[in-house]
Image (spheres, rainbow, N blue to C red):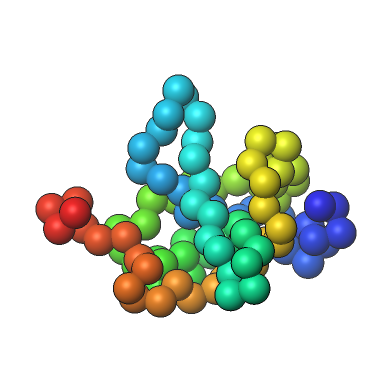
């Protein structure tokens, strides 16, 4: 993972679930078109909101902590500042 971190900012915003299970943060993983699994990260909060929508829960963390996520969750790649299509974004709590 360290090779990827050299290309990422020192702090990233990570989309996550609003359901914390057993005190553990559940990051959102996204399937890619070729069947791989991606962890999305954002270089700034305004980018996360514009790319994921205003209802997306998130956590901010030092990029070096992405290694801790990789120890617990399997993903194939990290994608930076990727826009999530409108139909795949979280809806407001009342609309769920």
Which corner quadrant of the image does residue 41 belong to? bottom right
Residue 47 percent across, percent down from the top left: 48, 70
Residue 17 percent across, percent down from the top left: 41, 45
Residue shown at 70%/61% (left/top)?
Answer: 77
Whether residue 11 is visible: yes
Whether residue 9 is visible: no
Residue 36 percent across, percent down from the top left: 65, 64
Residue shown at 59%/69% (left/top)?
Answer: 32
Which corner quadrant of the image does residue 53 belong to? bottom left
Residue shown at 66%/36% (left/top)?
Answer: 72
Q: Which of 7/19 is in front?
A: 19
Q: Which of 95/54 is in front?
A: 95
Total numbered labels = 0
Above or below 92: residue 71? above
Residue shown at 67%/46% (left/top)?
Answer: 74
Q: Which of 19/61 is in front?
A: 19
Residue located farthest toward the left when viewing the structure as drawn: 94
Residue located farthest toward the front when viewing the structure as drawn: 35
Residue 38 percent across, percent down from the top left: 62, 61
Which corner quadrant of the image does residue 8 belong to? bottom right
Indicate left or right for 62 with 83 as reference.
right
Residue located farthest toward the top when viewing the structure as drawn: 22
Q: Quadrant of the C terminus?
A: bottom left
């Amino acid at each position: 993972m360290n090779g990827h971190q050299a290309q990422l900012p020192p702090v990233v915003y990570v989309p996550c679930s609003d359901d914390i299970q057993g005190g553990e943060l559940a990051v959102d993983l996204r399937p890619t078109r070729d069947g791989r699994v991606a962890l999305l990260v954002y270089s700034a909060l305004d980018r996360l909101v514009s790319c994921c929508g205003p209802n997306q829960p998130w956590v901010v963390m030092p990029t070096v902590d992405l290694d801790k996520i990789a120890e617990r969750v399997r993903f194939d790649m990290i994608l930076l500042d990727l826009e999530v299509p409108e139909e795949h974004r979280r809806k407001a709590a009342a609309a769920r």
